[in-house]
Image (cartoon, rainbow, N blue to C red):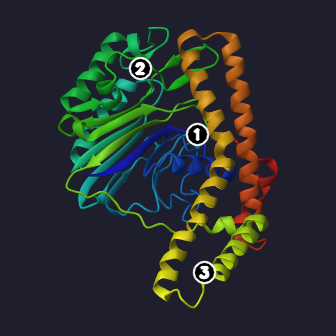
Amino acid sequence: MAELRLISYNIRGLKSPIKRNQLFRQLHRNKAQVVFLQETHYKHNKTPNLTRTLYNLWYHSTSEYSNKLGVSIGIHKNTPFTLKDIQTDSHGRYLFVKGVLENQIFTWVNLYAPNTDQKKWLLAILPKIEIFREGILIMAGDLNVPLNPALNSSTGKSAISKSALLAIQHGLHSNGLIDAWRATHPSTKDYTNYSSPHNSYHRLDYIFVPNQFLHLCTDINIGSMIHSDHFPVSPTLQIPNSAPKTYTWRLNETILSGTDIKQMIKKRLVDFFDLNNVEKISPHLLWESYKAFIRVFISSASFLRKNRLKKIDDLTEKIHKLETTHKCFQTPDILQDLKSAREELRDILNTNSAKYFLSFPRDDPQTLSNSRYITRLEVC
């Protein structure tokens, strides 16, 4: 079966082009194909034009009353999705999207619950989802409540009453919705949000699937906190009755932008034909030999990419290890090391993003409209 990588992330604001660039690159490297974002902070009917990004198909729900809310669902440019129906919320707290992907109907639901009256809000949303849903339902988002405080909160407590928690759990179960991460980690303590003022962790972000489709959800994990005070949640979904995708290799043209690598490749190609294009060799054999030889392009591109991304990968791994340790012990020295590592990574990402924007032609309208962000390097 073909696989579909999903990521749900409370991003705490995505109006800055710099931050969007960093986030989309990270999502692409993590092979995310469908993205659920909460707290986008887009103004009502003034969402940015994202058609030129890696994720060029977007559906938004924005608030008519506040620009501090908003949820969005993004589809990767290589994922063939056809929209059937969409339902938004005037408060920017939920978004329902229904469509066809790989001949299978999917219903994507993205939620951002309020931090009060979560029970009332969620129980009012579930019937709407039940009416709208068709095919395979994926419900993702930030519910702003640890459903099981003993496992979902580092303090073991919740500000939500026990009766309210039971009512929410009953509502989810009566609609056949299963917490996919908890189903595969039944006794594990892990969290998706860190409260700095209270020095406490909570699991507030979830992926829910109907119980009849739970077996399709594999390899679900909680990522690292880089762009927000939330951690992304990402499962892999097996698509029934579909074949795995095949990919055709193509040259990464960016390697030709470097003078040294371009001269090296040019010299090797000239040397190859000087040495091998002799009278006794057939054109067919020369061509087959040449195809094997040009694999130097692949190795060169791979080598350059690995070198370019190595420090980012090393820092990301370091952050993940520090986060895991801090979730267990929550000591000030570990927190300080974690903040330093995140700051170092943020500096690298800012530098890379600035180079990316400044590489646009000066008359590019998108660059000109975003020029004020380039100098400020906003990451909030």
Cα gap from disc 3 to disc 1, whole angstroms: 65 Å
| Above or below 253: residue 209 | above
Question: Along the horizontal axis of the image, is 93 left or right of 308?
Answer: left
Quarter of the figure with the C terminus: top right
Question: Along the horizontal axis of the image, is 124 left or right of 261?
Answer: left
Mark 2, residues whose alpha carbon is within 10 Å: few (<14), some, or many (≥20)?
A: many
Residue type at mark 2 is Pro
- Residue indicated by mark 1: 68
- Whichever of callouts 3 and 1 sits on the residue coming sooner in the sequence is 1
- Residue indicated by mark 3: 276
- Residue indicated by mark 2: 146
| Above or below 96: residue 326 | above
- Whichever of callouts 2 and 1 sits on the residue coming sooner in the sequence is 1
Q: Is residue 378 visible?
A: no
Q: Position of residue 236 (x, y in %)?
A: 36, 42
- Whichever of callouts 3 and 2 sits on the residue coming sooner in the sequence is 2
